[in-house]
Image (tube, rainbow, N blue to C red):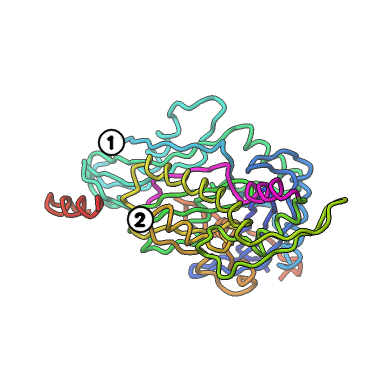
Amino acid sequence: MKKNVIAGLDLGTTKVCAVIAERTESTTNILGFGVAPSEGLNRGLVANISKTAEAITEAMNIASNRAGLTVKEINVGVAGEHITSLRHRNYVTINNPENEITQSDLERLKSDVQTIRIPSDRQILHIIPEEYFVDYQGGIDDPIGMCGSRLEAVNHVVLASVPAMQNIKRSVERAGLVVKDYILQPIASSLSVLEENEKDLGVLLIDIGGGTTDIAIIHRKAIKHTKVIGVAGSQVTNDIRETLGIVTADAEQLKKEHGYATENAIIKDEDIFIKGVGARGNIKIPVTLLTQIISVRMKELFTLIDNELRNSGFKNKIKAGVVLTGGGSLLKGCTELAEEVFGLPSRMGVPLELGTGLSNEVESPEFATVAGLIKGIPGQSSSENFTTVKTTTDKKINITKVFRRVQDFFDNL
């Protein structure tokens, strides 16, 4: 028998996650899930193709064995400081006899964006419409079927480094797989952990990984801004390692078991015993000292994001608050520190709307990206994201000026 399935691959600095799922119109059922240590990536970039391919193969083999099927095509998450974005506005004229806007007109809009001038070492990763205008009337989400003579769009265009994308492609192909689609990781995470009301009111998504932190600003259900920052969980671990003079594995364990993002979140200050290295004996330090080491780096990260939020012009639009996800967000006190730095309510984000199967295995912030990779590609229907595989068993209305004044008043509060 045949199944309609979709597979996702999250290439992280500390781990590679693979998931195989069956998609229906109403739900997503996890069929297989695999995780492998990652040694071939650095801050979202492939640093060693062979090691990356080995990690991909290991993660996919685990997922395939659990699912009882094999796949060849996968959606791959993309991150790294090479990612940039811009906003582009363009239009086309409607020439059919009845002036009715059709899907082909939207395709013409997208094709026109693909002709914009970009650096030779860059390629367009996503073209995501933020808003449509029909004969200068804005606030339109879906213009198909409307009548007009001019169709205009404001697009969020994501650019990626050509060499970086080629290295990802080669790593995946060396593992015996084919890339179906590339998806920017913060967009994938937003698909899995955000609620519709949050997207409408305005939300800041922060996905803290091992090598990079990905952010996405979403307002009125449209992605307004994305950014990848090269400060994340690995830098926190390295700070602990260098300050305390311990090996990386012990620093990571200390962070996970005893670390806090802010001293305000500490319930009880107690001593931690640290294993000695070489001639140095065991030592003990208070939890507050470990927290101070961690807090400096986490505050730096959140301050960088807050500056990015202000520079984007959307600080006053974030009415639903901040959603933290990714493995780095599991640090105790992370939401408290976010509320302190951003001055906004914060919550943890876990993958939503997963169905049966192994869904409980990915219901954690650290698997937000890979869960989003199987949700579907922005701007495409679900059917376009299906990969058919064989099982191993063969089985708008114009807004008045008064309303705009009221809205501006609340935005500036």
On screen, residue 341 above or below 94: below
On screen, residue 116 above or below 337: above
Question: Is residue 244 located in the magenta-colored stretch of the structure?
Answer: yes
Question: Measuring 70% from the left and 43% from the top, which residue is drawn there?
Answer: 41
> Of residues 203 and 91, which is closer to you in this image?
203
Q: Is residue 354 left or right of residue 401?
A: right
Magenta residues span 222-245
Q: Is residue 112 left or right of residue 29?
A: left
Q: Secondary structure at mark 1?
A: strand
Label tally: 2
Residue 177: where, in percent of width, then height? 71, 49
Is residue 378 in view from this perspective?
A: yes
**Position of the N terminus by quadrant:** bottom right
Question: Closer to the camera: disc 2 or disc 1?
Answer: 2
Residue 407: where, in percent of width, then height? 21, 53
> Of residues 364 and 168, which is closer to you in this image?
364
Residue 173: where, in percent of width, then height? 72, 44
**Residue receiving disc 1:** 93
Q: Secondary structure at mark 2?
A: loop
**Dot label at residue 202:** 2
